[in-house]
Image (tube, rainbow, N blue to C red):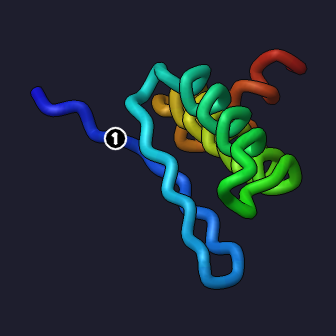
Amino acid sequence: MEIIKRQFVLNKGSEKYIFRYDPGQEGLLLDALVASANDTRTDFDWFDAAVVSFKLTQSLMHQADQILYKDITDPMQSCRHKNG
């Protein structure tokens, strides 16, 4: 079975930064963002790293929601059962 890589693309002026990673390797992506922000040969800076990191967080939250609610057609259904 082939693992599908995930990616984030950041367009900044005439430059395009593409970060690809395997699922479960988000820590390595964060390390790459730090290395890129520290690399003086590019215009990628700490704000750019924060933007991609924020996109990563949003993506992980969306994936978690899909796992949590995959068998529930109405996400509020579980709340109603708990409350009465």
32 vs 24, left or right, is: right
Q: Is 25 rendered above or below residue 8?
A: above
Query: In the picture, which quadrant includes the C terminus?
Result: top right
50 displayed left or right of 26: right
Of residues 4 and 35, the one drawn nearer to the viewer in this rendering: 35
Q: Residue at x 74, y 63 (%)?
A: 43
From the top left corner, tell me how far across and down residue 40 is, in percent: 74, 50
Q: Amino acid at mark 1?
A: Lys
Please name whichever residue, 18 or 83, is drawn nearer the observer in this view of the structure: 18
Where is residue 70? Give x, y as percent.
48, 32
At a point 69% along the width and 74% down the height, the residue shown is 12
Total label count?
1
The answer, for residue 77, to whether it is visible in the render is yes
Q: Does residue 84 sit above or below 74 in this rendering? A: above
Q: Please give the name of the residue rendered at 48% of the width and 22% of the height, measured from the top-left corner.
A: 25
**In-front residue for pair 6/12:** 12
Q: Measuring 23% from the left and 31% from the top, which residue is drawn there?
A: 3
- The local crowd at label 1, few if under 14, some if 14 to 19, many if 20 or more residues have their Cα within 10 Å, is few
Q: Residue furthest bottom?
A: 14
- Residue 58 at least partly seen: no
Residue at disc 1, secondary structure: loop
Q: Quarter of the image holding residue 77?
A: top right
Q: Quadrant of the N terminus?
A: top left
Q: Position of residue 30 (x, y in %)?
A: 66, 30
In this view, the residue farthest toward the front is: 41
Give percent across and percent down for residue 34: 73, 34
Q: Which residue is mark 1?
A: 5
